[in-house]
Amino acid sequence: MSTTLTACGSKEANPTHAETEAVYVSVGPENGPYLKYQVQVSRQLNPGDFENLTARGDQEKIDPEDSEYLRGIPSSELELTKNPQKPIDDEIYFGVFIQVANDNKQPLRSAALSGFEIEDSQFVAGSSTAEEHVFTPIAAFDPKNPGNPFLYRQAIVPGAVGTGSGYQPLPNSPAGSSTTAAELLVFKIPQSKLENRPLVLKIKGPTGGEAEVDLDV
């Protein structure tokens, strides 16, 4: 049964719905074991032309850090759909920085890249327009080993040692020692869809179980 955890609400043992970011949700089979997923932050990414920053784009809006986040993703995956007649429908890059924690003694496998998706508030399963309101992360050349150390990949999350949890990313890794202490999921979303709030991140575990997080867009 789904349980909800809010920033101000009571704490449940294994919550599967968070109404805000920075709250852990549990994903795993009905009787466990569970991994805990936490969205550290979600936001629009502003890489400009990450191969040539002087080529195009508003230079004041280009974030060099965001440019690095997209390295290792094929150009075909990075191509954004533009609508000259209605620029508000232009696609943008949207990043979700996520951390995984393991409180179990045994190592556990985290969700595959295909286990994540974002649904906006207009999504209705089975409807003729459902595909317009659900978004999946774009992948590196090798999703299991993307090369770029900041991109999310399915991994074995170390077991807990003593009172300390095991984490993905590892604390001493480039992603783990970054300001977000998280790995990045990259989505392409039409800018207009960001208004269909809440945007909900859905997470499916590799051995069962689902959870969702309302994103702070």
Image (cartoon, rainbow, N blue to C red):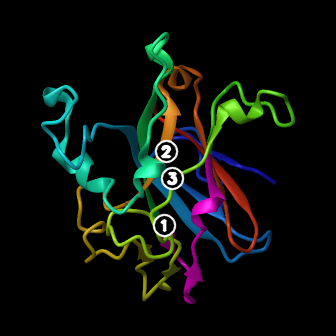
Which tag, 2 or 3, sits closer to the chain's start?
A: 3
Q: Secondary structure at mark 1?
A: strand
- Residue 182 shows up from this direction: yes
Q: Describe the element under mark 3 as helix, strand or loop.
A: loop
**Residue 41 inside the magenta-drawn segment:** no
Vertical position of residue 120 compared to residue 183: above or below: above
- Quarter of the picture holding the C terminus: top left
Instruction: Indicate left or right for 124 with 198 as reference.
Output: right
Residue 84 image point, x, y percent: 44, 15
Apparent side of residue 177 relative to residue 94 in the rendered image (left or right): left
Determine which residue is flagged by label 2. Answer: 187
Q: Residues within 10 Å of mark 1 (few under 14, many from 20)?
A: many
Q: Position of residue 212 (x, y in %)?
A: 64, 48
Q: Earlier in the sequence, mark 2 or mark 1?
A: 1
Relative placement, left or right, of 177 versus 114 is left
Residue at the location (23% across, 61% down)? Answer: 178
Residue drawn 49% across the image and 11% down it: 86
Mark 2 vs mark 1, CA separation in Å: 19 Å
**Amino acid at pointer 3:** Ile
Q: Is residue 104 magenta?
A: yes
Magenta range is 100-117
For the residues labelled 2 and 3, say whether their Cβ atoms are less than 8 Å apart: yes
Q: Amino acid at mark 1?
A: Val
- Name the residue located 43 percent from the left edge and 88 percent from the top edge: 161
